[in-house]
Image: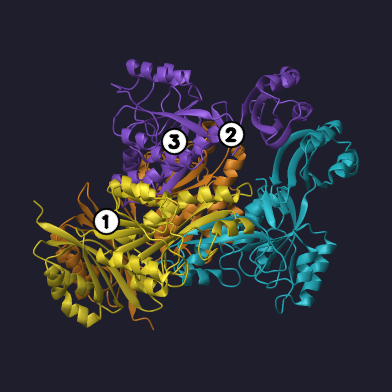
Chain colours: A cyan, B yellow, C orange, D purple
Amino acid sequence: MNTKQEAVILVSCPDQLGLVAHLTAALHEAGCNILDAAQYTDTLTNVFIQRIHISCPLTHNTKTLQKHLQPIISEFQMKIHIRWTDETKRVAIFVSKEDHCLHDLLLLHRDGDLHCSIEMIISNHEDLHDIAKRFGVPFHHIPVLHSGDPNAEHQQIELLQTHSIDLVVLARYMRIFSDTFAQKFSEKIINIHHSFLPAFAGGKPYHQAFEKGVKLIGATAHYATAELDEGPIIEQGIIRVSHKDSIKEMIRKGRDIERTVLARAVRWHLEDRIIVHNNRAIVFS
Amino acid sequence: MNTKQEAVILVSCPDQLGLVAHLTAALHEAGCNILDAAQYTDTLTNVFIQRIHISCPLTHNTKTLQKHLQPIISEFQMKIHIRWTDETKRVAIFVSKEDHCLHDLLLLHRDGDLHCSIEMIISNHEDLHDIAKRFGVPFHHIPVLHSGDPNAEHQQIELLQTHSIDLVVLARYMRIFSDTFAQKFSEKIINIHHSFLPAFAGGKPYHQAFEKGVKLIGATAHYATAELDEGPIIEQGIIRVSHKDSIKEMIRKGRDIERTVLARAVRWHLEDRIIVHNNRAIVFS
Amino acid sequence: MNTKQEAVILVSCPDQLGLVAHLTAALHEAGCNILDAAQYTDTLTNVFIQRIHISCPLTHNTKTLQKHLQPIISEFQMKIHIRWTDETKRVAIFVSKEDHCLHDLLLLHRDGDLHCSIEMIISNHEDLHDIAKRFGVPFHHIPVLHSGDPNAEHQQIELLQTHSIDLVVLARYMRIFSDTFAQKFSEKIINIHHSFLPAFAGGKPYHQAFEKGVKLIGATAHYATAELDEGPIIEQGIIRVSHKDSIKEMIRKGRDIERTVLARAVRWHLEDRIIVHNNRAIVFS
Amino acid sequence: MNTKQEAVILVSCPDQLGLVAHLTAALHEAGCNILDAAQYTDTLTNVFIQRIHISCPLTHNTKTLQKHLQPIISEFQMKIHIRWTDETKRVAIFVSKEDHCLHDLLLLHRDGDLHCSIEMIISNHEDLHDIAKRFGVPFHHIPVLHSGDPNAEHQQIELLQTHSIDLVVLARYMRIFSDTFAQKFSEKIINIHHSFLPAFAGGKPYHQAFEKGVKLIGATAHYATAELDEGPIIEQGIIRVSHKDSIKEMIRKGRDIERTVLARAVRWHLEDRIIVHNNRAIVFS
């Protein structure tokens, strides 16, 4: 029988002497063993960031652990986030009509490669209802009259909140949210944009890429913010194209890299490997 | 003894039925053998583009060959460009202070991997005089007060014209030319920009990339036009970075990809593998 | 209404003067227009290889076209292969238990990105029956006692021949065929091997890769021959790994590259872009 | 004035509870601050490996620091390696006739991007004497009659030992060492092999790659051991090729990746980022 449980702790605070030693000691005294640790100091803002993967006795919970760490949290002005690895995050996937990213996420989840529960699929179209059914995921069709449509957003938010959704994945969802929506789920929405941002932000990036005659096309997974295609970049990938590739070919080639890049970003988020600092995503991959 | 010579013919014209057959037949009648051929039809503009590598008797020259092809040139409104492979292009390299691209070009040339003669190095600084000397290439120090400085450009143009320069390579030359200069050497100036264009055009691209938190940095070789960093893209490459990479690290990592991408673009130009059509570079690589 | 049809012609013959001109002229006289052409001369064996994409009047068929070309076929000892682009190849996919490659092929096909008909899925296990059903593809479960099991091969061959299968795709089929089987479908079986061949041929390549501590893992699509993992390589791809990746992680990361590499190879085969010469696959991509 | 110095500590020992906490505490008590730390636990052998980058008072030296850590070194059976970052490693570069890797290393060193002193260049040929002179590095021409030639090795070892060389870089040195030589400098010789090992070990890897018709060629930097091309792999890279690439083209394309991969491996070694465990190189990059 398992007598241990595991947690990931994300820490950020002003950089100071002795930080790591005190934190490590406090964890040790609390009966925790450090399985993995990675750190980063942002020298521009003098901020220290650490991800610690611990195992600890089953008797602990977030409260008791936090209590143990309270003295050093206060002393070092730490922001701390604890997640137990047996808590699975609750995910909602937004889609429109394209299903390659959705399919990939559903298959990865089925194979045990995405540690989460996929609670629902929300779409502004009916097209992908069938896939949702096949994988046994509730599907909600919420028509959207225009980007930021308040009626639609109202229904979406209610669904997300009722089901305590932890992460929204925009798997080629072709609508933009209002500021209110974006802020309500700050750093909890991952979008895949089908270009190498900041090149070709906005609509029809492959058309833009074709016009420009680029020799590589890309995909960018980022946290969605109120400003379109401007949130912290989590991951990027590229694929080679040539003058021979029509826009249609670019779209086809791009699919491979979109789904891979999105899946990687989602996995890192689910494993608490990302801290956003100063609008940059620190990824402990 | 060689009784044959080789040439590369670049053809572009409105797409029509029978084009390839007539051109091939005309070349055959002129005693030419086709060693390699590659073609592309731009469906948007209905323009046919072909690169043909031929061998033909030593008795031919550009005039006689053109005379042979004249009937079909007229019939199909062909633009045609013939270059004999034993004619080496005359190259001038522009540099400022950084030498990694320059070094790479000089070493490739020394090893016989760039089919051209490097006639001169022109710089707005004295720093790289020494390398020029070592490789036996004339070095011209032409101070430039500001981008587009007419005095400097006057001297540069005179040098380039006096020495019948066919190709200007901007190997990390940190000044911008005037429209006049750019137009005088249209499609004869290759620049390396240290970003994945159109992302991060303009100055200090690695600083921009760092701020933006991108996960890949790139380099773009393109024909220089009057509009900064806007000319037809010949080749691009990327390299992975992470939050751990400082701007200094990005600059170091970027060097590897800058020199490789520039060298590839220069080689393709020297081998007449590029045709610019509709502001896109068609590369028969 | 369409008054034209298109075909792809693959040509190989001893290299000789005037080849391209004569072939082009013959096609022109037959009323064919050349839409695209790519050629390659193997200098070691002095063999000329060409892929020509033509359009021609609807009145033509393979016989009439071949008749037109007969004089130069004889003169130049050409081997010629004509395929009309409206003829779709008939494909059988072999699988075992893993479905990521199968899924990818079925989705690409559904989206119109693989020009073929998928006639059947054959498996030595029942596991993937469900997916076959979902996509409406007949599924044949043929248990295989051991690699090369003659009973199983007998049933497989009968199925393939009865349905006039043009291409067999081994989408992570974990059994090896007998020589007889491999020869019967020579250059008609595409296999995906989950390593960067010739490294890690044979079983459990990710385990081998882990042991060896490689920093990149790969996938190789190749024509299957009697000798295991030795047939002509069509396409390869790689993905980066580190010491942190367990074998399980490697397997997961490898899936992305396996399916992409296999799909690319299958598409090229379906578009008649591959000629095998001297055990090397010439790919006109 | 600097009142602090920095060191990198590499630790390996059997994995046990409380390890990190005790080590961190001991370093803290010794007045050290942890600037960066990365760890890895090999689950097969149950071995814990850590790289710690510290700053500490100038009063410390290796002896005093080791004394402070002695109790936990004993308790946890730690193997520990301390290097002060102001100690530069002493490097010898071995070459034959090709200079692209040598050039790259010398330029990186000149630009301050390789933290070491390049003490000498040793070659079995005279060809690269000139470059050595240009960069002011002593050049030793030691003819080698055959791989493992005891006379030559005797001279080489004497030179390396007299000059207290810490790292031998084989920058396309085309001779193999005897077991004695390899063992004397175990984990202190980095070789660049011009293939994606374990594919194409041994001689003429590009010829092997051409014959095999691979679509990617690679380069591998590894620690040299007595067994040819078998030592722990530090880094690998690849570049795409096609049927059009002759062996000569492959050699040219390969150069770009060889020098980049070698330089990366050398940098990581100089920054004490590599620990070899169980014949696998753990790289904390």
Q: Secondary structure at mark 2?
A: loop
Locate residue C64: give its quadrant: bottom left
Q: Quadrant of the C terminus of chain B?
A: bottom left
Position in image of residue C171 (x %, y %): 50, 50
Q: Residues within 10 Å of mark 3 (few under 14, many from 20)?
A: many
Q: Secondary structure at mark 1?
A: strand
Indicate which disc residue B10 carries.
Answer: none
Q: Chain of mark 2?
A: D
Position in image of residue C37 (x %, y %): 29, 65
Q: Where is mark 2, residue-wise?
A: D273
Measure how far apart labels 3 and 2 are at the Cα level. 21 Å
Amino acid beneath label 2: Arg
Residue D135 in view (yes/no): yes
Q: Earlier in the sequence, mark 3 or mark 2?
A: 3
In the image shown, does B225 or D250 lie closer to the viewer?
B225
Measure how far apart labels 2 and 1 are at the Cα level. 43 Å
Q: Are marks 1 and 3 on the same chain?
A: no
Left or right: residue C168 compared with residue D59: left
Q: Residues within 10 Å of mark 2 (few under 14, many from 20)?
A: many
Position in image of residue B39 (x %, y %): 31, 68
Indicate which disc residue D197 carries.
Answer: 3
Q: Where is mark 1, residue-wise?
A: B116
Residue C282 versus residue B41 in the image, above or below: above
Residue B93 versus residue D91 in the image, above or below: below
